[in-house]
Image: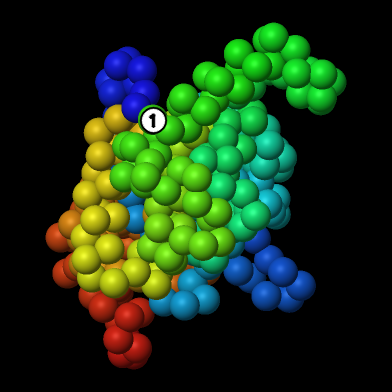
Amino acid sequence: MNEPDRKKTSHKPLLTLNSIAKAFGGVQALWNISFDLKEGMVQALIGPNGAGKTTLFNLITGIFTPDSGEILFDGRPIGGKKVYDLVQVGIARTFQNVELFGSMTALENVMVGQHVRTRCGFWSAVTRTPWMVKEETASRKKALKIMAFVGIDHLANRRSSELSFGWQRLLEIARALSSSPRLLLLDEPAAGLNTVETRQLGTLLKKIQAQGITLLLVEHDMGLIMDISNRIVVLDQGEKIAEGTPREVQSNEAVMSAYLGRSEH
C-alpha cells in the first residue's frame, strides 16, 4: 500500500506529550498528561467513561488547543495547529461516530481523503485541464488500491450511506489512510462491531502497523487492546494513572481500582 521505505521504523518517539492540561469552564478535563508514542508502535489509550480520552485525541488533532504543556510530532511542536495542517504533516484520525459523506460513493469518500496530497486547484477542476484529469486518474487508482488493502474494493461504487455499519467503519479507515499518514488515531474503532468484525479489525490494524504506520487508539474492547497493543496508557478522571505493556497494565492495582470502582486506602 505504501512505499517500501515506509516499512522501516526507528522506534524513536513520533509523538510526545509533555504536561498537557485542558479545562472547559471550571472542569479540569486533563491534567499533567505526559507520554511518548514510538514510531511504528500500536499504543492504546484506555480508561473509564469521562477519563478524558477523546479530549486528548482532539488536542492531538488540532480540534482543541492545550491550556498548557507541549505536543511534539517528530520533534516539532504542533499544539494549536489547524486540522488541515496536521493532516499535511502526516496525522489522520477516525471518529467514534462514523463521519462519511453519505451521498458519495465509497470510492469518492476515499478520494476525498487525498485532497491534501493533490495539487490541482479550483479552476483546474472546473476546466478539466489535462493535468487535472491525470491527477484524478492517479487518485482513483490509489483509492482503489487502499480499498483493496482494507478489503472493501468490491464496494467502490456503492453509496456510503447504503453500507452496513461494519463496512462504514472500514471505509472511514480507508479514507484516513488515503492521506498517507505517519500517525493514525482511531477513536473506538470497534464500537458497534460484532465479534467477527472486531477480529477482522484487529487483523487489519496489524496489517496497517506492518506498513510502518504508527497507531494510537481509544478503545473499550479489552480483548482487542490486549491483542494488538505494544503499550497502553491509562487515564482516569483526567490524569494518567498507568503506562506500560498490556501485561503490566493488566496487573496494575490503580487500573483495577479505576475500572472496578474500588476505594484505595
* Residue 5 place in picture, x, y as percent: 32, 15
Residue occupying the point 65% across, 60% down: 22
In the rendered view of the protein, which quadrant contains the C terminus? bottom left
The picture quadrant where one finds residue 87 is: top right
Q: From what the image shows, is residue 243 above or below residue 114?
A: below
Looking at the image, which is closer to me, 18 or 223? 223
Residue occupying the point 68% across, 66% down: 23
The residue carrying mark 1 is 145
Residue 102 shows up from this direction: yes
Mark 1 crowdedness (10 Å alpha carbons): few <14, some 14-19, many ≥20: some
> Three-letter amino acid code at disc 1?
Lys
* Residue 89 place in picture, x, y as percent: 57, 28
The local secondary structure at tag 1 comes to: helix
Residue occupying the point 64% across, 28% down: 116
Looking at the image, which is closer to me, 7 or 40? 7
How many numbered badges does the structure rendering display?
Answer: 1
Residue 18 shows up from this direction: no
Q: Is residue 184 left or right of residue 69?
A: left
Looking at the image, which is closer to me, 53 or 179? 179
* Residue 220 place in picture, x, y as percent: 35, 70
* Residue 49 place in picture, x, y as percent: 47, 77
Looking at the image, which is closer to me, 159 or 170? 159
Residue occupying the point 64% across, 70% down: 28
Extreme residue toward the front, this view: 157
In the rendered view of the protein, which quadrant contains the N terminus? top left
